[in-house]
Image: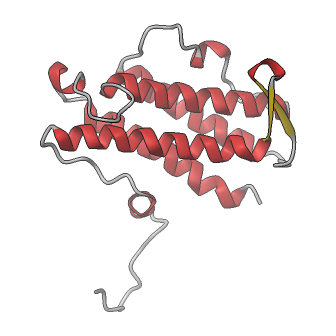
Amino acid sequence: MNDLVLDSFRHSTWATRRLVDVCRPLREEQLRATGVGTYGDIPTTLDHVVRSDTSYCRRVATVLGVDAGLDRYDSYRAEPERDLDELDVLAERTGRAWEAVLATEIDPEIVVPLDAGVRRCRLGIFFAQALNHANHHREQVCAILTGLGLEAPSIQAWEYGWATGRVWDTPGAATS
């Protein structure tokens, strides 16, 4: 059953890393641009995406008793903003950690305490939140790029499928 969501988490990691890669050559004033309704500038938003994803994964791994190779330092928000190279490395590590988590048996109904026990949720919500959160903020970065007059990369699941061979043309079939 976990294999069913493996592509979703692999796509999420791929999309974040793709966006980081596209943003590397930007000038400082481009990186620091923001947009209406966005989290912040490009590095701040990407930092938020990666650290949040790392935090979600670390918390799920802890609940499941999985050593995913992530520690609190990886997602601690009081740390200074990481540069794009550091974010790429952490995104890749977090992607491997999600794979370790997904390799275990997971009951999505496990109750997880939140906010020092003030709230609770089902474990499945962490998975939904991790994917939704990353998509939401990556699209904000794409909006900033478009607002700068730059072409935002296609980071849809379809593009991931093409890039990884999970989507392909049928030989001899007509395309429209």
Residue at horizontal 18%, vertical 48%?
Answer: 151
Q: Position of residue 34 (x, y in %)?
A: 26, 28
Direction from residue 167 to residue 153 in the image, left or right: left
Q: Position of residue 89 (x, y in %)?
A: 47, 26
Residue at horizontal 73%, vertical 40%?
Answer: 101
Direction from residue 105 to residue 50 in the image, left or right: left
Residue at horizontal 65%, vertical 39%?
Answer: 98
Direction from residue 29 to residue 19 in the image, left or right: right
- Count of number-bearing discs: 0
Tell me the quarter of the picture where residue 167 sits: bottom left
Q: Position of residue 97 (x, y in %)?
A: 65, 34
4 or 47: nearer the eye?
47
Figure check: 31 above or below 81: below
Residue at horizontal 36%, vertical 18%?
Answer: 83
Residue that protrudes farthest toward the left in the picture: 149
Quadrant into which the N terminus falls: bottom right
Figure check: 115 above or below 133: above
Q: Position of residue 30 (x, y in %)?
A: 17, 27
Q: How is the image coloured?
A: secondary structure
96 or 127: nearer the eye?
127
